[in-house]
Amino acid sequence: MIKTAAGKSEGLLESIRDVESVSDAHIVAGTYDIIAEIDAPEVYNVLEAVSSGVQGLEGVTDTKTYIAMD
């Protein structure tokens, strides 16, 4: 789940999709602006993609990570 600065969602969508391990990303309505799905073999890889990839993009203001257990 990704929050962006006002008016930045559309511009960030492709950059988020280009982050290694991101398999898909969509602009959504609600508390967060973009939902990205990360496909990685280990939890560490998910956290690395979020912290090094997504959070480092200019215009990203907040993230929340959920791990699917199935």
Image: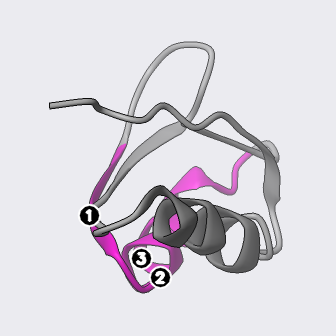
17 left or right of 6 in image: left
- Expressed as whole percent of the image width and height from the top left, the position of residue 21 reads 35, 77
Crowd tier of the residue under label 3, counting other residues whose Cα lies within 10 Å: few below 14, some 14–19, many 20 or above: few
In which quadrant of the rendered image does the C terminus lie? Answer: top left
| 19 within the magenta span | yes
The residue at which mark 2 appears reads as 19
Q: Residue at x 30, y 32 (%)?
A: 68
Q: Which region is colored magenta?
A: 7-26
Task: Tell me which colouring the rendered structure shows.
Answer: one colour
Q: Which mark identifies residue 14?
A: 3
Q: Which mark identifies residue 13?
A: none
Secondary structure of residue under mark 1? loop
- Expressed as whole percent of the image width and height from the top left, the position of residue 17 reads 37, 74
In the picture, residue 27 is in which quadrant?
top left
Between label 1 and label 3, give the one nearer the viewer: 1
Instruction: Out of 7 and 48, give the one closest to the viewer.
Output: 48
The amino acid sitting under disc 1 is Asp
Secondary structure of residue under mark 2? loop
> Mark 1–mark 3 contact, CB under 8 Å?
no
Marks 1 and 3, how far apart in space?
A: 17 Å
- Expressed as whole percent of the image width and height from the top left, the position of residue 40 reads 31, 68
Crowd tier of the residue under label 1, counting other residues whose Cα lies within 10 Å: few below 14, some 14–19, many 20 or above: some
Q: Residue at x 58, y 52 (%)?
A: 9
Secondary structure of residue under mark 3? helix
| 17 within the magenta span | yes
The amino acid sitting under disc 3 is Glu
- Expressed as whole percent of the image width and height from the top left, the position of residue 44 reads 56, 65
Disc 2 or 3, which lies upstream in sequence? 3
The residue at which mark 1 appears reads as 39
Instruction: Out of 16 and 69, give the one closest to the viewer.
Output: 69
Q: Residue at x 63, y 72 (%)?
A: 48
Q: Residue at x 65, y 34 (%)?
A: 64
